[in-house]
Image (cartoon, grey):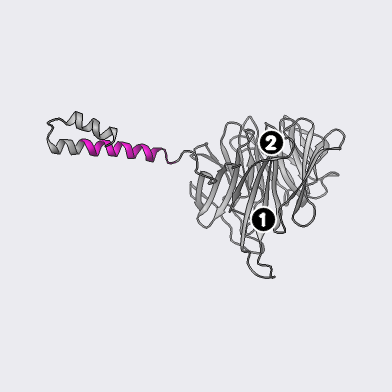
Amino acid sequence: MDIRMRNIQKVAGGMPILLLLMLVFLLAWTDNSGIKAKGKSSPAGNEPEVVLHLGWGAGPMESGRRPAQESAPEGPMSFTVSADGDIYLLDQVNLRVMRFDGSGALLSAIPISSDTFQDIEVAGDGRILLLDRLVRGAVVVLSRDGQEIAAHPVTGPSIPEGGGITAMLLEDDGLWIEYNHERSVRLLDGSLKACDPSMLEGRRSGKAGQTVSAALAGQGMVKLRVIDGATGTTVLQKEIDLGQDLYRIAWVQTDEHGSLHAMFHVVQTAGQAGQPPLREWVEGYRMDGKLARTGRFESPFTIRPWEQFKEFKVLGDGQVLQMAFSDDGVRILKWRYEP
């Protein structure tokens, strides 16, 4: 007999049977309610937490989807997270930026002028930066309510054509544009004004004065390098063998603690041309300052069937978010690493 039943018997005494049954039911209902209330806490195992889920459409809690025409089907191109934890989703199909709080509640829908924007970042003061690399060839700066403040061309000697831009990265010292996964060019200074371009090999690292580089290095191999930004010399290097099914490097970013986060898209094929893949997924690695792996997750969501510019975001504290598409809509997932 458990403690709860013994307590019921002590209270019951000569209590009428109907009242006793009501007491038992009330205790059981209270206990079950507590279990349900805890259901959305930390995810079990390697399952992600669903931070946000939107259906397809044009409603308040939906995101636009454009069917395949001459290219892949298109959903929201990018997302980001502000310093205060709000999620900004670039719903360019519906000509808007959707802003949600950390619990997934819709705060506002900010109109935008074009459906050709492909990336988004948010400054600490709430200004929104939108990248149109293919049509307008510019980074457009909006006020918090969506009014255009400025537009800065992205092409020049260091960035010969907009189609080669592979990332837009907002750092404390300004806005950096990554070109061809090889180099980063500072386009705007810390106040988001145009500045003389400065260039670094690789992608900005969370550690001052360093950059990181990730490149394919033969069949199934990835070469990671930590580079001294001042001299261009390699400080640390490591090769990772992901097997012959490695398809692409999806994302590389460091956090404020100095950990490196790298996501690799893997496609397991049947070995025959024209056959659908047996399985595909994203391998997420977290590595320490010596590039030793300290954690891993595996995501079944990949963008190969979709046109999408940015699918991952690493927050300063090391949390990893993914924008994932499925038949029933868009999810922002928060992944946790396992040893």
Residues at circles 2 and 1 in contact by the CB criterion of under 8 Å: no
The one nearer the camera, 118 or 220, is 220
Disc 1, SS: strand
Q: Give the residue at x 12% y 35%.
A: 16
User: Number of labelled discs?
Assistant: 2
Q: In the figure, residue 334 lies in which quadrant?
A: top right
Q: Is residue 31 magenta?
A: yes
Residue 234 visible in rendering: yes
The one nearer the camera, 83 or 28, is 28
Mark 2 — residue? Answer: 259
Q: Which residues are magenta?
A: 23-39
The one nearer the camera, 148 or 140, is 140
Residue 57 visible in rendering: no
Picture coordinates of residue 299, whole percent (x, y): 59, 50
The one nearer the camera, 298 or 69, is 298
Q: Quadrant of the N terminus?
A: top left
Q: In the figure, residue 79 lies in which quadrant?
A: top right
Picture coordinates of residue 313, whole percent (x, y): 64, 42
Q: Quadrant of the C terminus?
A: top right
Amino acid type for the residue under numbered disc 2:
Ser
Disc 2, SS: loop
Q: Which mark is residue 101?
A: none
Q: Is residue 265 magenta?
A: no
Amino acid type for the residue under numbered disc 1:
Val
Mark 1 — residue? Answer: 266
